[in-house]
Image (tube, rainbow, N blue to C red):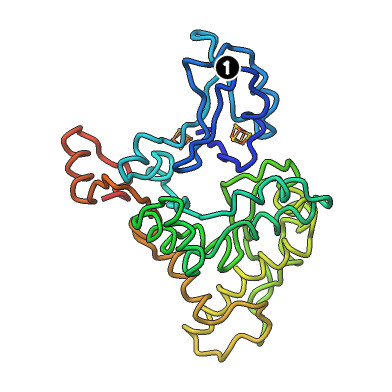
Amino acid sequence: PRLCNHCLNPACVAACPSGAIYKRDEDGVVLVSQDVCRGWRHCVPSCPYKKIFYNWETNKAEKCVFCYPRLENGLPQICAETCVGRMRYVGVVFYDMDKVEEMAATKNEQDIYENTVELILDPHDPEVIKAARAEGISEAWIKAAQKSPVYKLVKEWGVALPLHPEYRTLPMVWYVPPLSPILQRVTSDVYLPDAHEMRVPVQYLASLFTAGNTEILARTLQRVLDMREYMRRRETGDGPIEHKVDLTEDQMYAMYKLLALSKYNDRFVIPSDVKVSREGRLEMQQNRGFACPTGGCQ
Ligand code: SF4
Ligand code: SF4
């Protein structure tokens, strides 16, 4: 899949002379209208992530549609549902639309990531809930935002980062940066290396996720390392973790549960007013003869 980031400030939308590309009000999905597209192809080079392509048969631009027909029926995107590593999470985030332009224009590119996180609003905040209701956002969406795994990973625990924030499109697909294979020593008091000692250099990961800011990148990796250290100590009874960055024990345990043990309905929290139940979904798949190749979706 060439998963589009469904950016808050999409360069493809700005580049289209026909106005064929738009970001949907209801869920933020960025789409190309096949009726309006005139094949100018300005969108193709304008997307810094190279997500739009040109269909030479139809002479129209095409891109990932975030599986919107599934989304509208409460189903996760097919690339997320069928990921054999179960590493994709899908959820709602509320954001302050009036601040998008200002945040995208942040002078120092190394501040763009933190500014983007600031745009994301706390769905438990009574003021945010009130404003959401005033905008006509349904209770199902508010509840989904409150349960959103994406909100937790991005905002509550700060372990997911956007790819190349310096492109200023404010992408809405987030990545938990990888821990390298751990080849380090086990000494009496140190089991895991710290973020700066990992095999993939922090500088390299920072060039992908934080516009080169190694401090933010190391802090992010350290939170994931802390969670692992916390869980190890919890199992071995080695006593409390000493060098943790900033997360509480409850937060580390909740993060462990989401990243390691979560079930289908924890990974995909999709609001829909015509939501298909899990039983209905399975029945639908069986009727169509669909079977998950790994059994992971069953
Ligand atoms: S990733 Fe590219 S195609 Fe997708 S919304 Fe952003 S700029 Fe547009
Ligand atoms: S969300 Fe749907 S359209 Fe987009 S890459 Fe995944 S499967 Fe393809």
Ligand 1 within 8 Å of disc 1? The answer is: no
Figure quadrant of residue 206: bottom right
Q: Kindly give the residue lying farthest to the right in the view shown.
A: 108
Q: Is residue 282 left or right of residue 35?
A: left
Residue pictured at 59% horizontal, 54% vertical: 96
Figure quadrant of residue 247: bottom right
In the image, 243 versus 13, the foreground residue is: 13
Residue pictured at 67% horizontal, 70% vertical: 222
The amino acid sitting under disc 1 is: Tyr
- What is the x, y in percent for residue 163? 66, 46
Residue pictured at 24% horizontal, 46% vertical: 276
**Residue linked to disc 1:** 54
In the image, 147 versus 81, the foreground residue is: 147
Q: Is residue 224 left or right of residue 86?
A: right
- What is the x, y in percent for residue 179? 63, 60
Indicate the secondary structure of the residue bearing disc 1.
strand
Figure quadrant of residue 143: bottom left
In the image, 18 versus 257, the foreground residue is: 18
